[in-house]
């Protein structure tokens, strides 16, 4: 069952720091006035990298207004205290008491997002925050609805091993065969998707399988991701990498399960492209840090 707003609220203990007035909102006449990006950072025991990852995003030249939604998924190290030390109006923080899985963290973020589009960005420093601009630009320019930042072998990329590279290639090929698509890298973390599209999906996975479930749901609706190259430098398991070969098998199962749900029509562009001024959430008065209201 898709995580509801009330379930997301129950998973939330508190957030930190009130946001001051953001000033005048962009006018509808500006090219990117309708884009508000929610960057989601799921975190579990990332005390060595969390601050660097957050600061990298806050310092990045992102060509639209954005919020950074950090979901602490039951960390048992110093991650919680480090996140609480942050003091930036663009950061929202959600603390989950127990480790529910990366998929559960992302699903909670989908329910809590106030942006028009959502992008997951891990806290492990494997990706470069400067690439976010390249991922969001096709949406700003009206060239795409869904954008994937793909890792191209031999171009600013370091894969952990041949096994992982082949696993990604094989599961991407499987998705292409099941859905008649032609993707390059289905397991990239950098997937930019309209929030309303995500909320329309039948998302049920709680672990890494959610990544495959989102791609399957996108493809069965007829969308084909617009791909842009991004850099990637993988860390090893000794450095904290959490994904395992068994997750590849789960990926194939999830892709097949979603495929059985059948095709769905694409959502109208008027639904996927809300003008920022028409959003129900007033971004100039949005509070970052209060416990969710009922």
Image (spheres, rainbow, N blue to C red):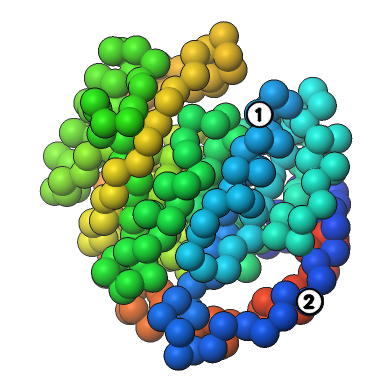
Q: Along the horizontal axis of the image, is 78 left or right of 114?
A: right
Specify the quadrant of the image occupied by residue 293: bottom right
Sequence-first disc among 2 and 1: 2
Residue under the image location 53 percent in, 19 percent down: 241
Specify the quadrant of the image occupied by residue 170: top left
Local SS, label 2: loop
Q: Which mark is residue 21?
A: 2
User: Which quadrant does the C terminus fall into?
Assistant: bottom right
Across and down, in percent, residue 67 comes to 64, 60
Badge 1 is on which residue?
Answer: 49
Local SS, label 1: loop
> What's the distance in space between the residues labelled 2 and 1, CA to CA?
30 Å
Residue under the image location 35 percent in, 46 percent down: 149
Q: Nearer the viewer, residue 2 or 15?
A: 15
Q: Is residue 231 above or below residue 145?
A: above
Marks counted in the figure total 2
Across and down, in percent, residue 59 comes to 61, 50
Q: Along the horizontal axis of the image, is 73 left or right of 159?
A: right
Tell me the crowding category of disc 2: few under 14, some 14 to 19, or many 20 or more residues within 10 angstroms, Cα based: few
Across and down, in percent, residue 221 comes to 28, 61
In this view, which residue lies farthest toward the top? 238
Across and down, in percent, residue 30 comes to 45, 84
Residue under the image location 77 percent in, 31 percent down: 79
Residue under the image location 82 percent in, 52 percent down: 87
Q: Nearer the viewer, residue 190 or 71?
A: 190
| Whether residue 36 can be seen here | yes
Q: Which mark is residue 96?
A: none
Q: Nearer the viewer, residue 117 or 29?
A: 29
Q: CB under 8 Å between callouts 2 and 1?
A: no
| Whether residue 200 can be seen here | no
Tell me the crowding category of disc 1: few under 14, some 14 to 19, or many 20 or more residues within 10 angstroms, Cα based: some
């Amino acid at each position: 069952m898709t995580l509801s707003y009330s379930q997301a609220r129950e998973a939330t203990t508190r957030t930190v720091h009130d946001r001051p007035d953001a000033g005048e909102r962009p006018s509808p006449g500006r090219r990117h006035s309708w884009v508000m990006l929610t960057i989601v950072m799921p975190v579990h025991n990332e005390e060595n990298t969390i601050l660097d990852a957050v600061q990298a995003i806050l310092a990045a030249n992102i060509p639209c207004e954005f919020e950074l939604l950090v979901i602490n998924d039951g960390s048992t190290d110093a991650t919680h205290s480090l996140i609480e030390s942050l003091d930036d109006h663009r950061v929202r923080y959600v603390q989950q008491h127990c480790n529910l899985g990366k998929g559960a963290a992302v699903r909670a973020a989908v329910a809590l997002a106030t942006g028009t589009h959502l992008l997951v960005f891990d806290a492990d420093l494997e990706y470069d925050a400067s690439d976010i601009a390249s991922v969001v630009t096709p949406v700003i320019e009206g060239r795409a609805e869904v954008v994937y930042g793909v890792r191209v072998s031999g171009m600013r990329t370091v894969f952990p091993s041949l096994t992982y590279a082949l696993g990604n290639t094989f599961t991407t090929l499987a998705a292409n065969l099941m859905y008649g698509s032609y993707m390059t890298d289905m397991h990239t973390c950098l997937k930019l998707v309209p929030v309303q599209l995500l909320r329309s999906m039948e998302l049920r996975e709680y672990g890494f399988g959610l990544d495959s479930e989102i791609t399957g749901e996108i493809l069965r609706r007829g969308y084909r991701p617009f791909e842009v190259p991004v850099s990637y430098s993988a860390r090893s398991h000794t450095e904290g990498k959490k994904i395992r070969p068994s997750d590849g098998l789960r990926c194939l199962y999830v892709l097949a399960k979603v495929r059985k749900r059948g095709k769905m029509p694409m959502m109208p562009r008027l639904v996927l492209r809300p003008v920022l001024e028409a959003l129900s959430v007033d971004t100039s008065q949005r509070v970052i840090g209060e416990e969710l209201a009922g």
